[in-house]
Image: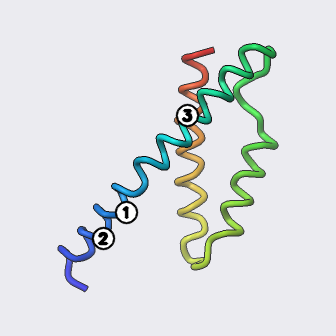
């Protein structure tokens, strides 16, 4: 595969991810609203670990498992920042 072909694949996948990330953030807004109404903290260590474990279990190429976990940790970190700024 040539460099430009690989970059085109990355660009296509990025465009597919954008609406999924927006959908996830829509859910984060609802979680934030619930936490605000019920006085719950932003950080839930058990929930984060469960999410990472579920994601890891879905990785088919185990060479990517740690990278995928890091990506999802970063996504959750951004979501926590959003929650903190909106609580």
Residue located 57% across and 79% down the image? 61
Residue 47 place in picture, x, y as percent: 77, 43
Residue 84 in the image: above or below residue 74: above
Measured Cα–Cα span from mark 1 to mark 2 = 6 Å
Label 2 environment density (alpha carbons within 10 Å; few <14, some 14–19, many ≥20): few
Q: Which residue is mark 3?
A: 26
**For the residue labelled by badge 2, is the local secondary structure a helix, a strand or a loop?**
helix
Q: Where is residue 45, by image quadrant? A: top right
Badge number at residue 13: 1
Q: CA distance from mark 2 to mark 3?
A: 26 Å
Which residue is tagged 2? Answer: 9
Rendered view: 46 above or below 33: below
For the C terminus, the quadrant is top right
Tell me if label 1 and label 2 are in contact, CB under 8 Å. yes
Q: Is residue 65 left or right of residue 7?
A: right
Callout 3: 10 Å neighbours few (<14), some, many (20+)? few
Which numbered disc flags the more N-terminal residue, 3 or 1? 1
Most extreme residue toward the bottom is: 1
- What secondary structure is marked by label 1? helix
Residue 18, how many percent across, how many down?
Answer: 40, 48
Q: Nearer the viewer, mark 2 or mark 3?
A: 3
- Determine which of the numbered discs, if any, sits on residue 24 in the image: none
**Pointers 2 and 3 in contact (CB under 8 A)?**
no
Q: Could you classify mark 1 by the number of other residues whose Cα lies within 10 Å: few (under 14), some (14-19), or many (20 or more)?
A: few
Residue 15 drawn above or below residue 41: below
Q: Which of labels 3 and 1 is toward the front?
A: 3
């Amino acid at each position: 595969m040539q460099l430009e072909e690989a970059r085109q694949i990355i660009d296509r996948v990025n465009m597919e991810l954008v609406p999924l990330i927006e959908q996830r953030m829509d859910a984060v807004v609802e979680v934030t609203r619930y936490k605000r109404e019920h006085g719950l903290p932003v950080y839930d260590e058990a929930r984060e670990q469960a999410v990472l474990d579920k994601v890891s279990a879905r990785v088919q190429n185990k060479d990517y498992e740690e990278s995928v976990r890091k990506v999802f940790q970063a996504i959750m970190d951004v979501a926590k920042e959003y929650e903190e700024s909106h609580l």
